[in-house]
């Protein structure tokens, strides 16, 4: 089945480049490009804003309940793996600063089959992650209503689903009206959120080490310092580290990509990893495993209450709302760019890459991103959504490292990155092994769901895209 032709020419701030796609019946040329409107601040806001939501406001209760303070090691493992992948991704992104991120790099390095599987898996993986963030938003909104004395008449689970669905629709519409609008919202949310968190965590850390006394009982978490449980929790919380790769999905809209892409990806990983470790240390210093398990997705609200009373709970609720909003907003933006990149290469129908003439955004791709998100968000299956998203991204991360090795081996004329990973093949090899290896510690249901997604995407390649040959990198 040949892909459809079409496309709209939108002038951006950078020279228009051309993507050529060969099929059995025709050669399709599409010179439409998105505008470069995102700077370093916007890139950091996408990376930090996406990662900080789940890592700080949703996972402490889930992770602390499993292994206690040893969850700090789980987050550290996740941060190291993310950094090992962020370095190769930065090199690839500066050589190929195009919308689509990991899909684009893998398709150019490993071919159309791998590109199709990863492109569609990236779409679905981001859908799972975004739904997870929206569910977290629903839980925090429900807690916020309770703190201000508003009692909901319907079941709490229904209210969480309604909030998640409405928020998903709202963020989709916002992104349709312009990337710059979404970026401004993201910048403002992240700036306010970081200010609140730094102040709160500084006080919590001082209390945990005994410099100040907030009147909290000492935590009695039954720490599980064993490799298996720590790695299992690392696999669960790895969803927290998906934000750096989402920066690469909007590479086609980044100003000065050779400088800003590596700084945004590597910087966001380092900043957020430190904040994760401090957060889980504070949480497990205040409560034991049973208390964290009982509080679940909103355990940090109770941590805030224990440290600073009702005011502390309100700070965390507001922060949780801002963080999950920021994660969901950035993820919907990135999901649409993954769809846009795959469609421009004719691995999906070409109409999916159409650009809105008024706003300069891929409105069809945004609809294909937001639609499945709101459906999954209504299920409220937090842990499954998180792990499936992690599984699909870990596959992509491992293959990105492999793609870098393949491209370096072939040395094509067009490959001229502004940033190169030091140490030759060492870091990409370790990054690939670490990414694939972490999957072994996941829940079997999450692995099974991810494998089904991969088989379905491979089936789409043989049904629709097997006659497409990607030619060139830009």
Image: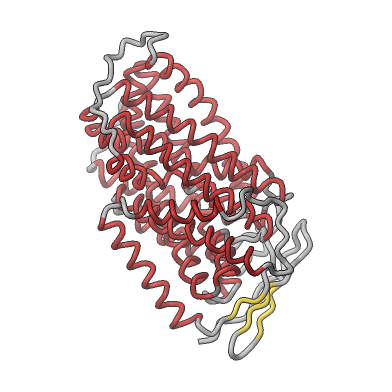
The structure residue drawn at horizontal position 58% and vertical position 62%, both measured from the top left corner, is 405
Q: Is residue 238 visible?
A: yes
Residue at screen point 36% across, 36% down:
140
Q: Is residue 46 above or below residue 315?
A: below
Picture coordinates of residue 452 (x, y %)? 33, 68
**Where in the figure is residue 297, as x and y percent of width and height?**
31, 37
Q: Residue at x 39, y 54 (%)?
A: 389
Q: Quadrant of residue 234?
A: top left
Above or below: residue 191 compared with residue 156: above
Q: Residue 451 in the image: state x and y as whole percent.
A: 34, 65
How many dots with numbers?
0
Q: Residue at x 77, y 56 (%)?
A: 13
Observer-nearest of 182 and 107: 107
Where is 254 relative to 270, above or below?
Answer: below
The quadrant of the rendering that contains the C terminus is bottom right
Residue 311 is situated, as x and y percent measured from the top left of the image, at: 39, 18
Choose between 150 and 2: the one closer to the eye: 2
Extreme-bottom residue of the structure: 25
Q: How is the image coloured?
A: secondary structure
Up/down of 262 relative to 101, above or below: above
Q: Is residue 174 visible?
A: no
């Amino acid at each position: 089945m040949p892909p459809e032709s079409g496309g709209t020419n939108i002038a951006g701030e950078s020279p228009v480049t051309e993507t050529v796609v060969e099929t059995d019946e025709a050669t399709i040329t599409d010179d439409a490009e998105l505008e470069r409107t995102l700077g370093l601040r916007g890139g950091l806001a996408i990376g930090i804003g996406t990662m900080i939501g789940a890592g700080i406001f949703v996972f402490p209760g889930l992770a602390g309940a499993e292994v206690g303070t040893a969850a700090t090691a789980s987050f550290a493992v996740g941060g190291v793996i993310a950094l090992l992948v962020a370095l190769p991704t930065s090199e690839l992104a500066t050589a190929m600063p195009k919308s689509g991120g990991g899909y684009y790099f893998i398709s150019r390095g490993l071919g159309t089959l791998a590109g199709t599987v990863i492109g569609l898996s990236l779409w679905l993986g981001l859908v799972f992650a975004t739904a997870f963030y929206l569910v977290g938003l629903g839980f925090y909104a429900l807690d916020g209503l309770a703190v201000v004395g508003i009692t909901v008449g319907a079941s709490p689970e229904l209210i969480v689903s309604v909030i998640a669905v409405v928020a998903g629709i709202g963020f989709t519409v916002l992104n349709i009206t312009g990337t710059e609008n979404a970026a401004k919202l993201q910048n403002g949310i992240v700036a306010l959120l970081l200010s609140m968190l730094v102040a709160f965590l500084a006080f919590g850390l001082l209390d945990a080490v005994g410099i100040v006394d907030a009147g909290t009982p000492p935590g009695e978490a039954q720490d599980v310092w064993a490799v298996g449980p720590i790695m299992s929790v690392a696999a669960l919380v790895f969803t927290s580290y998906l934000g750096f790769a989402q920066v690469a999905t909007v590479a086609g809209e980044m100003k000065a990509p050779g400088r800003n892409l590596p700084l945004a990806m590597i910087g966001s990983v380092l900043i957020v990893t430190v904040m994760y470790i401090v957060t889980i240390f504070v949480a497990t210093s205040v409560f034991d495993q049973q208390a964290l398990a009982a509080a679940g997705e909103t355990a940090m609200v109770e941590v805030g209450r224990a440290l600073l009373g009702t005011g502390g709970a309100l700070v965390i609720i507001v922060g949780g709302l801002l963080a999950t909003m920021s994660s969901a907003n950035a993820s919907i933006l990135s999901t649409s760019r993954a769809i846009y990149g795959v469609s421009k290469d004719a691995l999906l129908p070409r109409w999916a890459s159409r650009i809105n003439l008024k706003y300069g955004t891929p409105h069809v791709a945004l609809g294909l991103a937001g639609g499945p998100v709101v459906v999954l968000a209504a299920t409220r299956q937090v842990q499954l959504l998180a792990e499936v998203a992690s599984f699909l991204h870990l596959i992509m991360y491992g293959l990105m490292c492999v793609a870098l090795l393949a491209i370096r081996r072939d040395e094509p004329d067009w490959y001229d990155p502004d940033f190169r990973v030091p140490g030759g093949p060492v870091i990409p090899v370790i990054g690939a092994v670490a990414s694939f290896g972490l999957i072994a510690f996941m829940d079997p249901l999450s692995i099974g769901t991810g494998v089904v997604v991969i088989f379905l995407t491979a089936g789409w390649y043989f049904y629709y895209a097997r006659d497409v040959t990607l030619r060139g990198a830009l």
